[in-house]
Image (cartoon, rainbow, N blue to C red):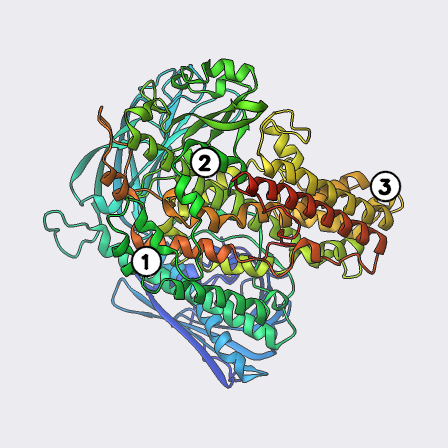
Amino acid sequence: MFEGEADDEDMSPSTCEPPSGPPVFPKGAYSAEAQGKVKAPVKEVWKVFRPFGKPCLEYWKIYESMKIEAPGKDVVGCVRSFVTSKTGSHIKERLEWRDDINHVEIYSLLSMTPPPPVTMTNVYTKVTMTAVGEKETEVKFECTFDVSVSFAVSRIQDKQKGAYMACINGLQQLFHSEVGTLEVVVRSAADLARTDGWFDADPYVVLAVNDGKPVTTKVCSSTQKPIWDERFQLPVTSRSRNVNFTVLDRDRVGQDDIMGTANVNLDELTSDKEKKMTLDVQGGGTLNVRLYLKMHDKPKEPEEGEKLNKPVAIPFLAHVAQSEMDAIKNEITSLIMMFAGPGQKYEMSDMTRLRTHPDVPLEEYPAACVPLPTQEMFTPRKAGRLMERLMEFIASMGGILVRRDELKGKGIWNPWKANFSGNLPANEKLIEEWQKDEEFCRQYLQGINPMLVTLCKDQSLIPAEMLGLKGQGKTTLQLMEESRLFIVDYAPMLGVPATPGKVFYAPIVLMYKEKLDGGKSRLNMLGIQLTRDKGINEVYSPESAKTHPNKYMFAKMHVQSADNNVHQFLYHLGYTHLAMEPIVVALHTHLPPDHPIHRLLLPHFKDTIGINFLARHSLVSRIVPITDPMFATSTVGALIMFLNEWRKYNFMDMAFPKELKRRGFDEAGTDGLEGYFYRDDGFKLWNVYKTYVTGTVNRAYYDDQAVQADKSLQEFCKMTEGPGKLHGFPREISTKKLLIDCLTNIIFNVSAQHSAINFPQYDYDSFVPNRPGQLTSQMPDGPNDMLESAVLEALPPKRYTSLQVLLSYMLSMPSQTAITGVEAMKDVYPEVHAKFQTQLQDLSKEIKGRNEGLKAEGKVAYTYLDPENVAMSIDI
């Protein structure tokens, strides 16, 4: 029985008399319409649609909650109140008319909170259902309304149509969601990766069609070669694209470990034909399965090899693309309306799941500010600088084909230099030395991603196959005992689903501190292991390079490709851009403009929401994400990788000093590693920030009790940690020390940290062989070395090469305001401001002096944490 209905007032279509006729309602000057068909008899569709309250949520997914207000009876004249999922708006509507014989309903809009930017009156909606044959129903929505300003009509019409189509599509999915079935037999697996050192696993498989509920096999105990032989029957819908397999190791204590993943595209299957497959498990090993696809209601018998999933998939995807285009158009229109009206408040919204991959719970991401507040729109100067940068790139690309032809035959890597011309200078030293082990290792300390190198003090982290490596006559374990062993583990890549045509690994790299003459040292290569299989992992080292130089070089390129993907989506987009956005929203929501913490932080949030808005509609767009063809993970794989790592993230534990300490580095440099300028300059800049923040907090708060009593500050914290989903952010701050640590961490992240991992991009990414976003070939098997031509063929297509250069050039655009230009406390606490500026200038001089010395020695300067180069905010 539906909510709010009583037995004696139930009006089923089979028993009620037709009403004499609807009353006359005011007809507005404007109208909006939407119609579509549902493949079910009209009586069945009407029976599902008819309830005016909570049951609507079953098919009308754009609403978060819905109920009929007291007395709760679903009759003409009742009022329903509901909340929209996307904006959180509270809306009330009244049921004005219902005709169960002719399947007609009329309802009116009573109120909307918060009120829309323009005044709407006389809003009436009529819903009519008409039988089309015995098994199909046409559903039509007609809305009339008056509005205070005519320029808003188009926007309102689009919003109404979108809401109505969401209802029709929901009904369609409810009645005609299954278009076939997929029978899956999970047979066995072999050579699965170990997750617990030397111990055998307890593997089981979780499988699901991408839009369906997962099912699970039994657990096979203590084996790397499990045999399940279990059969499952899964529904296939018009949304179905892939069947995904995840192999897990059952742990008696703690969370089960992922051993690897595999997937099958349903386009590879033919209806009514069984297919046996041996799938490569991303993470190690193989999985043996049998698949049998059976489609319903086929319009014709398939020809040999015909892919029956395509006729279902293509119209559906076209509809998704159009609906997403409409969503973006609505956002832009809304932005224009807000600009012309009172403006938009700062509001948080969860990231919505991709319709092409509804199994990925993107709502777990840090919350975003949607829609874009007018205050966060780029200034004309900023927009002009972005356009200027783009035009500089386009101008520099002129004649690129001629340059490529001229460079052919003058060295296998020279054609990649064709990208450099005009405004795009070449990093000649990098191009000359990128293949050397010393340069490869230097980039972990001074390059674009200094976030992964770790002092290795735990033998269990070292793969067995790498224990035999030697550096300067010392074994791996001897180097570890002398604190000279360093490791980089690309474990985040393990959970990323594979994309056809792209190849990536989750490598493990060992490096060591090489002792040089004169008491100097440097980081140098020990070895690379790309795979994590059982006992068959090949290790590539400087020793193997003597006989297989191209294989060794290709292994290093695979490592740099993995590093490019992890850097870009985890440390850059994830931990800086997305993670910091909830703080900005909470600041504007709960800290008034004259609050000292608001004044302190405000400059450090300039353009952050605006640049994130741009990224969501370009780099990781819902329709044509720029990053999809560029990177090995593809966009969805990258989002999955960040999601997996985000679940482990803790804001305070990721503070610069703690994060460095966890990897074995401290301010005193007890690790003994020379040239780690990210560490050296970072600690100095952190200390300057902390002194600055301490001065501000000491003047703003007399003692800990004053901090605890600041209600605005506490609400700011609750919103950031709660709805903002910034894990590890203090839910409340009761001491000055915790407030100082938290604020220092915020300012460092949005300025120094982002600058250190963003601005080096052009220097290192623009020469694609040094850091390819993707490679298209696996490491070759067999005893022989690779051909140089095979290495070249594995590099990204030329069109993606230019895209990688463009992205690196755009993202490296210098900030409009460096940290030395911040004047937040100049008028509030002038002595704090003066000390801050003096310390920044002193540090800048110190770093410049160091860099001049490096240049004199023919070495590379590290400029990214010079305060004069550090952006005050995430503004690009």
Give the Cα distance between marks 1 and 2: 46 Å
Relative to 661, does residue 749 appear above or below in the rendering? below
Whether residues under marks 3 and 2 lie with C-beta atoms below 8 angstroms apart, the answer is no
Relative to 688, does residue 147 appear above or below in the rendering? below
Q: Residue 496: give its label.
A: none
Indicate left or right for 277 with 734 as reference.
left
Give the Cα distance between marks 1 and 3: 57 Å
Q: Residue 704: give its label.
A: 3
Which residue bears the numbered disc 2?
A: 439
Going 61% across and 25% down the picture, which residue do you hit? 671
Give the Cα distance between marks 3 and 2: 49 Å
Q: Is residue 732 visible?
A: no
Q: Of label 1 and label 3, which has the lower sequence position?
A: 1
> Which of 410/511 is in front?
410
Which residue bears the numbered disc 1?
A: 317
Q: Position of residue 822 (x, y in %)?
A: 72, 57
Mark 1, other Cα within 10 Å: few <14 / some 14–19 / many ≥20? some
Q: Amino acid at mark 2?
A: Glu
Q: Is residue 568 visible?
A: yes
Q: Amino acid at mark 3?
A: Asp
Q: Position of residue 182 (x, y in %)?
A: 26, 41
Q: Amino acid at mark 1?
A: Leu
Q: Furthest-front residue in view?
A: 856
Q: Position of residue 539 (x, y in %)?
A: 35, 23
Indicate left or right for 605 with 183 as reference.
right
